[in-house]
Amino acid sequence: IITMKDIVREGNPILNQVTEEVTIPPSEEDKETLICMMNFLKNSQDPVLVNKYKLRAGVGLSANQIGLNKRMFVAFLTDEKGIQHEYTLINPKIISHSVSMIYLPQSEGCLSVDREIKGFVPRYERIKVKGFNLEGEEIELKLSGYPSIVVQHEIDHLNGIMFYDRINKENPFQLPENCKSLY
Ligand SMILES: O=C(O)C[C@@H](Cc1ccccc1)[C@H](O)SCc1ccccc1
Ligand code: NI
């Protein structure tokens, strides 16, 4: 199973490069990997397993965070309305997005970053994403709010972008005018 020792930390160049597209349909090995990645997220949200395996909670994980140069990620989260979202996306592409932006007032964290970084991360409020699922079928997702933030954080990883790259260098709490808090 995936535990924290398998998670690559900042400083490893794989986190700063654009990852390679995955062959569709995904190989058995790629499917296995994605299932393990999703299980890590579920384990990381189970208090018993968190204690047993000393896991950090995660709502998203990209393949390059476990050292794989593959354009794929998983997300497992509960949104502001208490609805559960479970996504496995291969070769994801944001095909359109809102002009309006949102940010998490508590800033963002990252399983690959072992330090607290303060500052707001402006994200698109709504995104339309195209990609392929575990079966290799093309899927299109329309996301807003917290799920939209999580998926943008993961797609950034696949493009070698860390959340802190999006924090304003001069004033970490400065925001573009069309950006409002998620809550
Ligand atoms: O490092 C990762 O990619 C996983 C991040 C994803 C994330 C998405 C949006 C905003 C912040 C982080 C981890 O989930 S960070 C830990 C965490 C756990 C539960 C809720 C929020 C953040
Ligand atoms: Ni991250």
Image (tube, rainbow, N blue to C red):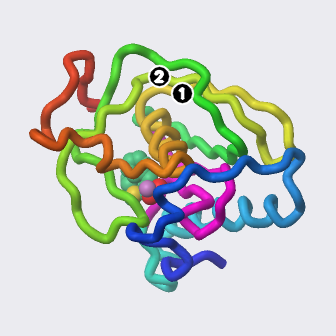
Does 99 appear above or below 152?
above
Give yes or no for residue 63 being in the magenta stretch: yes
Q: What is the x, y in percent for residue 93?
A: 63, 32
Q: What is the x, y in percent for residue 107?
A: 25, 46
- Helix, strand or loop at mark 2: strand
Structural distance between the alpha carbons of marks 2 and 1:
6 Å
Span colored in magenta? 57-79
Q: What is the x, y in percent for residue 88?
A: 69, 47
Q: Could you tell me if the residues under marks 2 and 1 are in contact, i.e. CB atoms within 8 Å?
A: yes
Camera-side residue of 87 and 14: 14
> Who comes first in sequence, dot 2 or dot 1?
2
Say whether residue 47 is left or right of residue 72.
Answer: left
- Residue shown at 29%/39% (left/top)? 121
Give yes or no for residue 58 being in the magenta stretch: yes
Rendered image: mark on residue 143: 1
- Residue shown at 37%/32% (left/top)? 123
Q: How many marks?
A: 2
Extreme residue toward the left, this view:
171
Camera-side residue of 111 and 165: 165
Q: Amino acid at mark 1?
A: Leu
Does 56 appear above or below 127?
below
Say whether residue 93 is left or right of residue 173.
Answer: right
- The residue pinned by badge 2 equals 126
Q: Quadrant of ligand 2?
A: bottom left
